[in-house]
Image (cartoon, rainbow, N blue to C red):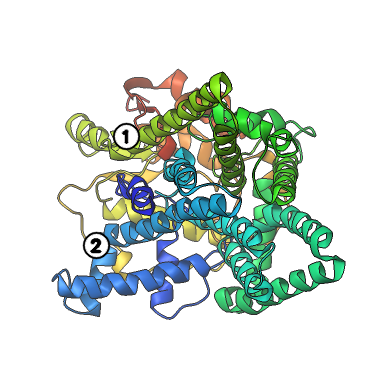
Amino acid sequence: MFVAAVLFRAVGADFGFFNGDERVNDAARFLAGELIPTQHFYPPFFNYLNGLAFAGLFVVGLFSDLWSDTAGFRDVYFTDPTPFYLTARYVTAVIGALCAPLFYSSARRVGLSPVQALMSGGFAAVFPIGVFMAHIAKGDTGLATACLAVVWAFLMRIDTPHVRRWDIVLGVTVALAFGFKQSALLVLGPLAMGMIFVLARREGPAASLKSFGLALLVLLVLWPVMNIGILLDIDGFLAFQKIQTVMSVREEDPFGIGLPITLAIFGDAVTGLNPVVFAMSAVVPFWLVGTACRLDLRDALIAIWIMNLLSVLAISLTVGTRQPEHLFLPNLYIQLLLAVVVMMDMLRAYVGIPRVIVATAALAGFAIMVAGATNVLQQALVTPNATRLVAFLDESYPGARVQTGIALPVPQTVAAQQMEFARLDRLGAKYGIDMPEIAEERILTHDAENAIFWVNVPFVMSGLEGEEAKDADFPMQPHTWPIQPEEWTLETWVKDDFDVFVVNDFDYLLTNSRSPDIRRFHAELLSRCDRVRDYTARKPLFLEFDLTVFDCSAL
């Protein structure tokens, strides 16, 4: 089951391009002895894990003649970092696949048979959003697995003769969760209250608080070691947390406006539980208090369900309309576990027609998940539109200057790279920021044979595109500046001899972007330039949406 879960998450790992949230550079810096990351949006623990994996990659490369020494290893990183990205994604895949055995063990702990527990683990193995997020080397998958491990350790802790052992294990799982992302607090905070309550009812308040204290002590000992880079740059970490708050919380959103979005996410067939399993998850508390339920530890399961719901509500009310697909990944895994163990319990409790109905629902829910996971893998494996786009640009616009909303799979010209470097230097000087030093190997010295003069659209980090970010009070860090209005006028680019504009998700940017500057820019493209080519999205999950090419050479 674990191997199957790994395969679902590893197939298509090379999906054609890199994700900006994959901090492979910080993992490589760790391998070079640098403990402080270039960004503190996430704790550095995952960078350290990937850095250790890169050390393993180095050894494998030595034996397979991919490189002969550390210099060759470094050259490959700057020439084509794909092996490093794939290594980090495979690490993520293995971490995500651990959810399947955690489902199995948790199901056994609450009284399900080995076969029923195996079927429970099967749901985790093919969980579409879990499969998708494990294709991207970022901490969300680790956070979800660690939060699920906290639930597992709590269930194992109840009624055990080895109380202190499981208190320590519980503390380790909590430390892992906070090591992957500090937002673990939004999931584990409510769960901790539920766990304390359950243990207090079963063992008394003193024993409950003692267990909590030991787990907390383990957290306080392990977390600083796992994330030493934060302690070495505590001011930088706090600065990035202020920026993260601006990015995540939309103060202009009316209270509760995000709840319908959350509901839609949980019912979605790819990014959520799917309608069948979501409906079953709503039945969980009613089944657990009913007389037909034969599950063990029902009080703990009810507490987990309630506190997970409170966590979801708190997150939704806090972030408003900004709800990316990975936001509720830990909550979704926990909810899926509860829904699945209840379904399995119903199958053994019911006979006749009711059992057929439950079995049909379970099979339908599983089939929808398999279809969703298949959709993820299809998107991962299909050739990116960017490949076809480059062929079109090379044939139709040789030598043209191109502004593009997606990274093109061909080298930039030296002049294009220098233009982007100059922009970063200009904005760094504008905001008084010392920009990170660029490795010498990163700087182009000559144009490759297939090079194109292409530069990226000057988007800001997601969450900083709104008007409020321009006036937000936070300590500016590299790349965290707001929209620059002068960069979002067509005339600026025409004066620099840009003829071709490649837009990723044009309709959204034209009508729904939170930035009026971005909306005006794309309206200007539509009214003044020729729309010469459209490519239907092949990888929307991986942020390659419909591509539109505009020819503005007549201006």
Check disc 1 and give the amino acid type: Gln
Res 550 seen here: yes
- Sooner in the amino-acid sequence: mark 2 or mark 1: 2
Q: Residue furthest right?
A: 205
Which residue is rendered at x = 24% and y = 66% of the image?
76
* Residue 466, x across and y down, in percent: 65, 39
Which of 282/456 is in front?
A: 282
Q: How many marks?
A: 2
Secondary structure beneath dot 1 equals helix
Residue 336 relative to residue 200: left or right? left
Secondary structure beneath dot 2 equals helix
The residue that mark 1 highlights is 378
Which residue is rendered at x = 22% and y = 39% of the image?
399
The residue that mark 2 highlights is 79
Which of 346/104 is in front?
A: 346
Residue 391 relative to residue 14: left or right? left
